[in-house]
Each structure stands twice: as structure tokens, then as C-alpha cells.
Amino acid sequence: MGLLLALCLIAGGVMPGYASAPPDVPHYFSGSVSFNADPVEEGTLVKAFVDDIEAAWTTVDDQSRYSLGVPGTAGAAEVTFEVGGVPANETATWQSGKVQELNLTIDETPEPPLPRYALTMTEDPAVGGNATDETGKSPYAAGIEVNIKAIANPGYSFVGWTANTTATFGNATAAETTFTMPAQAVTVTAHFEAAYNLSMAADPVGGGDALDVDGKGAYAAGTTVRIKAQPKAGYGFINWTADAPVTFHDATAEETAFTMPDHAVTVTAHFGVAYNLTMAVDPVGGGNATDVGAKGAYAAGARVRIKAVANPGYGFGNWTATAGEFGSVTAAETTFTMPDQAVTVTAHFEQVSPPPGVPTVTTQAATAITSYSGTVNMSYTVGNFSSVEVRFACKRLTDPAWFYSVWVPRTADGTYTEVLTDLVSQTEYEFKAQLKYNSTVIEGAVYQFTTATGTSTSLNDLLGYFGCFIATAAYGTPTAKQIDVLREFRDVVLLKSTVGSQFVVLYYQLSPPVADFIAGNEFLRTLVRELLVDPIVWIVEATGDIWRK
């Protein structure tokens, strides 16, 4: 039974020491230290090296003896020693936890012992806590780095370290730090102050959590205390309050800080039911409107940071909302106070007049819209340039990428139109005009239109997918030459027969979900193009002399 219990404990992790190798512990050395059989002077420095890296040091006592623990790791090899800066004749092989008597001898006169100075640790006030020399080897030679530690008593908190002479601390405000010994006796003092309890509360209790980030629970007056609010699902943070006057860095920020008063205090994070915040822009191509916190839902009364960034050719105008208040309706970066309802906040942009001589382009409304086609329009100026190029970008509202018409050169101010074909009935599209001069591309606003309801067979709708949907997914444009080859094969061969037409209908009924899946993944798009579509195109082109007859 005892053996079975032991095996269960080991398997369950109750005795982890038997499940893995024990941790490395120092190799302990002690012994006498002599020069030509004569004892060396008290205070002579003894250093130990593991694989030529200094690992420990101590000093010789009044009996000309030393004792030190030498840290190391598994795989460490040779341990060597120096006595007063002179290499000792003896070496050893490092072993974890070994205790070894090793007398050290040297053949040269050691350096005289460095002067050593007393380190005294004190507390202020004495009842505030304890200050300790963790190294525990006072007196010390100048330059020795000593580990020191302060532990506050209940009702007090540590403030910082001082010394009665010029001294260097690793971190004078850290309770556990280092101190570099000066060339004189020194008193190091740990300072404590009365600590006052900090209680964190949430309102309502189920709305979220209020956190004391450092988790100390008690702080001295004047201490900067970091706090954080974490709303739960369906709630948003509103603000911080306290049951006594305190100074918050920002009472409306989820993560902030406040200055501890000279008394106990309860700090409360207030939460409320969260309402959706939708960001919009007007016009669509004028720029971007951002909810800086990116939470998308906030409690009534929450102060939300918002930002507007105009696109080239536009300037920010103002903010509007269906409800709520702005810090400034004309500032591109401002705040918005959330109302007790879902709300849409809109950033309005205005086209900026370009400098004289710079070309311009303006998107104009679509015309002649049918079930399967539409005419897109623009006006433009060439400015001081001899020629420019214009084109349109277009896509279905739900498609991930634009497709483009070809660049068309223009040498005088005017208008340009393009007829988009192979569209899908009852579908929303968006488009924008583009103009290029030198290597600079400028854009007009984004306009939208919706195709009419189809009046013919469903095959026309399905064929539209090939021009806009599948092409966008696989090639990113409906104008790729591979698409032209496949479209020609469809029209010349497949649609000329009943079986071919039925195949096309079935294909387009099944393909849209697949195209949607691959559209947003560049790897899948490449895979489909190179392993499926391109080989089919090659076969169709290679047999063109046969099916084109």
C-alpha cells in the first residue's frame, strides 16, 4: 500500500523533486590559506572562478581560513582560485551540493588586503520595518556590491533608501536592491511611512472588476497608485470616483492612476450597460473615422476618443451624431460622450481645392443602370501638364478588392465614361475615378449604385459572377487575359449546347461560396490560380484552333 501511495503521489505531481532533476546548489569550499607555508593576512581577498568566470568571493579570517559557496550549473567544469590577486595552486571540479575541504597555497606575495569598512543598516522610523544586509559580510572593501532589503511592518510601506555619505544604489526606491560600498564606513537607512488601506470597488458589482495594479493594498500618502477597470461582457466603463477627495490622472480612462491621500480610501470603478458605437464617413472616399479605443460599445456617459483622418484631396470638416455630445465638433481628434442608446458618429470631409496647375478628378454619379450593366462617369482637368491618364476602380460592395479599367491618356480637360458589363442584378456596387500624372495617383469620391432587378433567366445573373465575383477572388481583376480566354470558351462552346448551358448554371450556383472563401487569402488565391485556373487556360488556348472553327 505504501509503495502504491508513493507511485500515485509521484504520478500526480505531489513529489515533483522525483519527477525531474534536483536544482543545482553551490559547491562549498573551506580551508586554510598560506603563502610559502606562512598564513596570509586577515582580510586577504579570495576569489573563485568557474570555467574562468568569477563566481564567488570572500576574505580570509583571523585564523587564515576561508569559506565560500561557489554557484554553478550542470556541465560546469574547473574551479580555480585567486588569493590576493595571485592564482592559487589548487583547482577543483565543480559538483552541485558538494562540501569540500581545500587548502589554498600561492607562490607569490599576495596583494595586501584592501581596507574594509563597516556597513550599518537602520530604519526610519524604527517601528516602520526592517532593513537587512542580505550579503551579510560586513565590513566590505570599497567597490563591493552589497545586496540590501527592506521589509515594511503592518501599517507601513517602504519609501526609499538613503545613506549618510555619497553612495550608489541600484534603485533607491526598490525595497530589494543593491548598494555599492564607498571607501569609508557608512550607514544605510530604509525609510518607511504610515500606509493607508486602499479598497477597490465596482458599481454595479457584476459590471466589471476594479484592480489595484501593483496589488499592495496599502500605500503611503503621496504615492502614485496605478489602477485599472475591466468591464465584463455587455458592460462598458464610465469613470472613477472615490469616497474621499483624491486626484485622478484621468477619471474617465480605464487604466489610470491617482495620488494616495493621508487616510484610507475606497476607489470605485463605475460601469454601465454598453451600447454600440458605429463610425461612419461622409463622403465614403473622403477619409477614415476611428474609434481610438476600438471597443465598439460603451456605457452611457463614457468618454470615447475618436479620430478623423482625411484622404488626399480632402480636409476634415466636422463631426455629427444621432445622439451624444462632442468635446469639439470641429477637431479631427476629440472626445465623444456616449448616450444611453446605440449611436452612429459621422466624420464629414470636404474636397480641398488643389494648388493652381495641379490636375483634378471628380467622380460623378453612375447612369444608364440596367440589370447587368452601368455607365460610370468622371470629370477631370489636366492642369499645367501636357497629358494625364484616367481610369475607374470598381467592386461589389461586399468584395474585398477593387478591379480597374485600363489607364486612358487625356491631353485636355473633359469628361470620361466607362460602361461596366457582366454585372449581377439587384447588387450594390461602388466605384471611384482615378487620375495619374507623373507617378502621382489622385482619386475622386466613392460613389455607389445598385443594378436593377433581372428580367431574363437566372443564367444571366450567374454569368455576371464570372465577370466580377470569381475574377476578383482568383485574379483580383475581371480584366485579366486568362478571364477573357475562359469567357470566350464559355460563350463559343458551352452556351451553344443544352448540356453546356446546364453545366455553366450548376457551376455558378456552386462557385460563389468558394470564391468568397479564397478571396481574402492570398495563399489560396495563388494556389487556385497556379494549380487550377492557369492549367485549364493553357488547355483551352492550346485547343483554340479546334473549338474556334
Image (spheres, grey):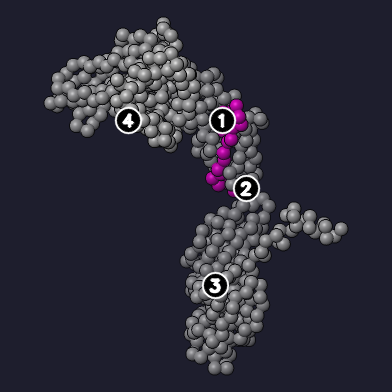
**Which residue does the numbered mark 1 point to in the structure image?**
237
Given contact means CB atoms under 8 Å apart, are the residues at marks 2 and 1 in contact? Answer: no
Question: What's drawn in magenta, residue-wise?
Answer: 219-240
Give the position of the N terminus as an image quadrant: bottom right
Amino acid type, residue under disc 3 in the picture: Ala
Relative horizontal placement of residue 131, taking residue 302 as reference (left or right):
right
Quickly name the residue at label 3. 55
Of the residues shown, which amino acid type is indicated by label 1? Phe
The secondary structure type at the circle numbered 2 is: loop
Relative to the observer, which residue lies in front, 386 or 357? 386
Q: CA distance from mark 4 to mark 3?
A: 77 Å
Counting residues from the start of the chain, the first of labels 1 and 3 encountered is 3
Counting from the top left corner in percent of width and height, residue 90 is at 56, 85
In this rendering, position of residue 472 left or right of residue 314: right
Earlier sequence position, callout 3 versus callout 2: 3
Which residue corresponds to mark 2? Answer: 216
Name the residue tied to disc 4: 542
- Nearer the N terminus, badge 4 or badge 3? 3
- Mark 4 or mark 1: which is in front? 4
Magenta-colored stretch includes residue 109: no
Residue shown at 66%/30% (left/top)?
206
Q: Position of residue 20 (x, y in %)?
A: 67, 61
Q: Residues within 10 Å of mark 4 (few under 14, many from 20)?
A: few
Q: Secondary structure at mark 1?
A: strand
Q: In the rendered structure, which amino acid carries the disc numbered 2?
A: Lys
Mark 4 to mark 1 CA distance (whole Å): 66 Å
Measured in 3D between alpha carbons, the distance from the residue under mark 4 to the one under mark 2, in whole angstroms, is 78 Å
What distance separates the C-alpha of mark 3 from that of mark 2? 35 Å
Q: Earlier in the sequence, mark 2 or mark 1?
A: 2
In the rendered structure, are the residues bearing label 1 and label 3 in contact, judged by CB atoms less than 8 Å apart?
no
Q: How many angstroms separate mark 1 from mark 3 (CA)?
A: 52 Å
Going 45% across and 19% down the picture, which residue do you hit?
503
